[in-house]
Amino acid sequence: MVDPNVLQPKPEIKIMGKKDVHLRKYQQIIAIFKSNKIGMFGVSIFVFFGLVALIGPLIFPYDPLQIGSGDEVLQSPDSTHWLGTDDLGRDVFAALISGSRVSLGIGLLATFITMVIGTLIGISSGYIGGKVDTILMRFTEIFLVLPWLPLMLVLAALLGSSIWNIILVIGFTSWSSTARIVRAQTLSVKERQFIERAKAIGANDFYIMYKHVLPNVFPLIFANTILVSAVAILSETSLSFLGMGDASHPSWGMMLHYAFTSGAASVGAYWFLLPPGLCVVGVVLGFTFLGYAFEELFNPKLRRS
Amino acid sequence: MKLNYLIKKVTNAIITLFFVLIINYFLFRVMPGDPLAMMLRDPKASPESAEKLKQLFGLGEPWYIQFGLYIKQLSQGDLGMSFLFKQPVVEIIAIKIVPTLLLVGVATIVSLIGGIFLGILAAKNRGKKIDVLSLSFSLLSYSMPTFWIGVLLVAFLSVHLTLFPTSGMTTSGMVFASSIDATVDVARHLFLPALSLSLVLLGQYVLIMRNSLMDELTEDYVQTAKAKGFSEKYIIRKHAIPNAMLPMVTVISINLGFMIAGAIEIETVFSWPGIGRLMYEALLNRDYPLLQGIFLIISTCVILANLIADVLYGYLDPRING
């Protein structure tokens, strides 16, 4: 359970120096996180897969072009191939490790694009208001309504399957919910007094949006980023499974595509079918937990008493 | 429901539809893999057929005339010819839409009923085992790639236990003695794809029904009803549940995109002869006219369904006035 003292904003914070306030904030964050099992679970998964993606490929080198000999095809797990081999005799474990880098990389970069677009549109829409708001929100609604997978598939098919195109396609089609969330938060920040004061001393709109609105919206954006990256990784998996992936950089979705097209299901090659899917589930679960934990952290209303 | 709410929603739908048309028209001509340029570059194409193509698409004319021509052809129900099947796109889609509606329809009904039931159960037993269990299930089904659920079910139930056929909608080459036999055969083929899609949708519906009902239970009118001496059961059934169902209407429309994504993946896994499988084939063969047609049809359906849900919601909830 959360210590009630931790949750209460302490009145003396106001008279502390800026550094102390920050220190206090971090201590508070860590305390809340430690008391939040779900958050800790999310953090551990995040760290685990982060390390695997960063260091793993150095220890277990993998070359997707290197194909094993005929008798190495679809071997069940043994001491040389810990997770067996795939339809072309490649080591599944090494592919899995190298796939983590591709899947996470695509997910994070696509999320970055999503966040930049969503934040720009959300803040401008909320802060400027009026006609700009109407137009931007209409535009956002269009992207909210359009069925995302067919849109991504059409774009990916037209652009051609390369890693960068997949990142662009996911990034440019997934920003609508972020824009809405950021806009809503901007509307509430806009009404606060310090914005009025900044205006009174002659700050221009861009300055206010950048220096005052953004920092106040940022915690929410951060929590949303983690949730969005879970969705981005799922999207990438679906796109790759449907044959839109980059064959020279096989992701987990691509592995599942190969597993499916080579008929791993009908020969019972579970070592080829299960691990990539389990990794996706693990990462998405972890990121979702982490995202919710951060949302709870930055939005005290959501905290359970 | 106010008139301007209706007008706003209808204009939104029209704008969105127009945007889809623009995507469909410009993307398929501007992008690197421009299918028209590809057709014209084809060395096997005779000069006459190239001339005919140019005339058909109004090439050489300004873009607005070309766009006008495209809209005119669309309004006549002409979506072009498929490269792969050498048939009009409209005809191909018309055949494939029935199996998709069957699959999505069955999955939606099953998951909605299950979702509402489980959601109510979870909300009533908040924090207890059944609640935790249904929450975990929702989270898990949310984090699983839809197609992966399908592939695992095929591997385990069809291949390993040979309980169900692995793919298709009917047993090929089989002659049925009666229409009952034929229905049973389709049902056997439908079971796994419908189950996979239901599982994915179920998680969402459970979560939303649970949260919506829990929100309602904190409302003042529930307190009032309690004070009047109504039983807990009666209040939940007669007061809270009808109100909690309201958000489900919007959720179904928001879920449409999700449902379609699920249908594409599941139909691909099970070779279910619907629109989703067709889209996969169009993608693999870069059959652009077919892809364009499918995208247009799917988007139009989603936009219309959203509009219907919005209007229905405005009608059901008098507080909404846009």
Image: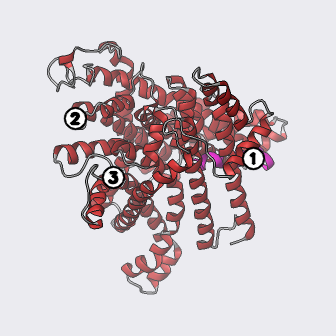
Q: Is residue A185 visible?
A: no
Q: Badge 1 sits on which subunit?
A: A
Q: Nearer the viewer, residue B178 or B108?
A: B178
- What is the x, y in percent for residue B256? 51, 54
> Which type of secondary structure does the marked residue at label 1 adopt?
helix
Tell me how far mark 1 sits from mark 2, CA to CA: 50 Å
The residue mark sitting in front, 2 or 3, is 3
Above or below: residue B315 compared with residue A198? below
Is label 2 on the same chain as label 3? no
Span of residues in magenta:
A128-146
The residue beneath circle 3 is B169
Indicate the quadrant containing the N terminus of chain B: top left, top right, bottom left or bottom right: bottom right
Which callout, 3 or 1, points to the residue nearer the camera? 3
Indicate the secondary structure of the residue bearing disc 3: loop
Q: Nearer the viewer, mark 1 or mark 2?
A: 2
Tag on residue A270? 2
Residue that label 1 marks: A135
